[in-house]
Amino acid sequence: MSARLDFNSEFKIGNINNFLSYGASYSYGANNGLGQVLDPSRPRVLSKASSNSLSSNRSERYYDFSLAIAQKDFGIYAENMFTAKIFDRNLNVRTGIRYDLQNSLPSFSPRANINYELSKTVRLGFAYGISYKSPALGQRYPGPTYFEIPVVNAYNGKAAESIYLVYVNKYENSAIGLKSASSQTFEFSSQIKLKKYNLSFNAFAKDYRNGIGNTRVDQTVILPTYSAVFQTGTGKQPILTQNGTRTVRTPVYKFDNNLSSKSQGFDLIFTTPEYKAIATSFNISGGLFRSQSKSENLSYVNYDATNTNPNYAYTGIYRANNSVNYSSNGRITSSTHIPKISLFVQFIAEFTLLQRTVLKEFAGVPIAYYTQDGRYVEVTSFDHNDVNIGHLLKTKEELNIDNVPKIIPNFHLSIGKEIKKRFKFSFNVYNVFNYQPYYLNSGQQYVYPNQSPTFGAEISLKL
């Protein structure tokens, strides 16, 4: 359920007309379903127990959705817009602020958008804003996680004369202390008009904080091991004798504010008027972008589980992601309009100019590892010749496998036809030439970045 109330008013401060908008909103959301309802007399569909604790051993249990408190969001806002004269040129200003109470988490979001006409042909603009996004209901109330690990599986073909024992590990997820994610954005824009030609330049810087991601928590438990001796006679279960113990590791995940990023970039857009000789106008655009991503969550990779060496590093642990991504793209669009036959033709040529990720030098070097029996070992001095841990090293080829080594073009076509200004039919083709370039990535694998042609059609009727 949601409700919203908005007001608009106009007033003067001196000779300046101000247009003020203000209001409030409220939303309420709750899941009134029964939740995870399970019949104890029937097998659980998603249950999959394995002797390997790192496999998919998670299973469902009854979970009442009424345990999740309803989501209630309340907000108020005010925004003012006016135009002032500075040196006989227009200064357009739009400023505002919003206060939100999302899941009992308060936040203030100021925003400003200003542009100034330096001349009839040049305009400059600046914008700033902060926004917040509160955790969702599923993140605030994730519910418990269950892991099932077989301890004894002694089966002779008759259920009454067999034993199957399973260890169940229950992990209570908690979202206490989870904050709202926020982003802060700066934008600069400029526009130049030369007769009927337009050139615009836009740049931005965005800072994203407290992003919600998963943090891995490894728990280890010591479980007994048994030998089973089957008995003769109907209905007699095997005799179990404990013959040792084993250490089992169960990885679980919890929500945490462990993601952040900083992005910067710019783009250029150049548009032409329609050239009457060919009834066509052109639009040329391109940009360069940089994004630095950070995570506090360590990376885990499992390796050969069949190795029987007790000191063999089965799970490698690596530093949290700290990478910088560079990307650049360009696009040329031609738009042809033939009024006599009411035909529109648009052709698009787009280019992926740059796609590259730069990682830290130590990105592929492990900081610790787990053995098969659950022992945690820190790596203080890595030796790639060590038979126990040498395989943990990630090569540059593995780390750079997503980099694109060449320019990738693609081409699209759209055709539209109007009939008496009321009926319109359009047909679109993605990758119209079925152009399928390929390249070898650093892992010596063939990559085909362009999809095969796809088609779409649209019919619209105006009444």
Image (cartoon, grey):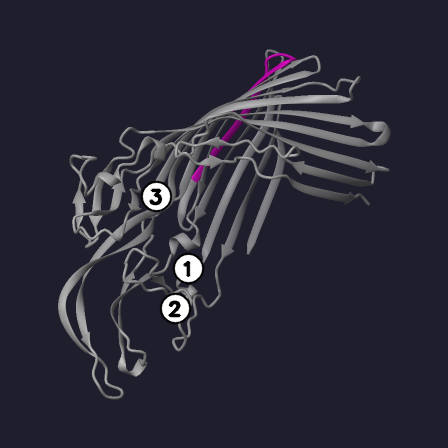
Q: Quadrant of residue 171?
A: bottom left
Q: Say few, some or many: other residues with alpha carbon within 10 Å of mark 1 (under 14 / 14 to 19 / 20 or more).
A: some
Could one spot residue 188 in this view of the protein?
no
From the top left corner, tell me how far across and down residue 4 is, in percent: 57, 48
Callout 3, which amino acid?
Asn
Q: Secondary structure at mark 3?
A: strand
Pointer 1 residue: 69
Task: Kindly indicate whether the residue at mark 1 contacts the one at mark 3 (C-beta within 8 angstroms).
Answer: no
The Cα–Cα distance between marks 3 and 1, rounded to whole angstroms, is 21 Å
Range of residues picked out in magenta: 108-126
Check the image and name the residue furthest to the bottom. Answer: 234
From the top left corner, tell me how far across and down residue 47 is, in percent: 37, 65
Pointer 3 residue: 257
**Foreground residue among 280 and 445:** 445
Q: Main secondary structure of the magenta part?
A: strand
**Foreground residue among 235 and 165:** 235
Q: Quadrant of residue 392?
A: top left
**Foreground residue among 21 and 218:** 218
Q: Secondary structure at mark 2?
A: loop
Q: Secondary structure at mark 1?
A: loop
310 lies above or below 18 = below
In the figure, is residue 17 to the left or right of 390? right
